[in-house]
Amino acid sequence: MEFFYQYTNRMAHLYFLRREGVDARLVNVCFLNDTEMGGPREPAEWKAAFDTARYVLGLPVRHALSRYIDYVYPDIDLLQK
């Protein structure tokens, strides 16, 4: 969890809320072309990062919470115009 604290924290919150009967979803907002932060340019780069996090944490690609997790990829270049 040292390297993926935010990801595991969000997953834990999602698990807790769903266990308590809250119809919760986790939406990961993955900005593209954020040159100030040196962020990914393509959704595939974000996917690879999330795949790495799941692998390190021992989670399969499809797990009990995966149907409640979404990903959106706003492009900074399009937002600034």
Image (cartoon, helix red, strand yellow):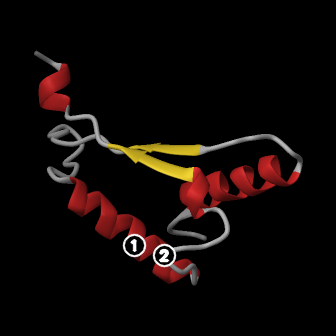
What's the CA distance linking mark 1 and mark 2?
Answer: 7 Å
Going by the image, does 49 lie left or right of 63?
left
- Quadrant of the rendered image containing residue 52: bottom left
- Residue 20, position in %: x, y? 89, 48
Q: Is residue 20 above or below residue 8?
A: above
Q: Find numbered disc 2 in the image and state the secondary structure of the residue it sits on.
A: loop
Viewport quadrant of the N terminus: bottom right
Q: Is residue 50 above or below residue 13?
A: below
- Residue 34, position in %: x, y? 20, 39
The residue pinned by badge 2 equals: 61
* Amino acid type, residue under disc 1 in the picture: Asp
Q: Residues within 10 Å of mark 2 (few under 14, many from 20)?
A: few
Going by the image, does 1 lie left or right of 28?
right
Q: Residues within 10 Å of mark 1 (few under 14, many from 20)?
A: some
- Quadrant of the rendered image containing residue 49: bottom left
The residue pinned by badge 1 equals: 51
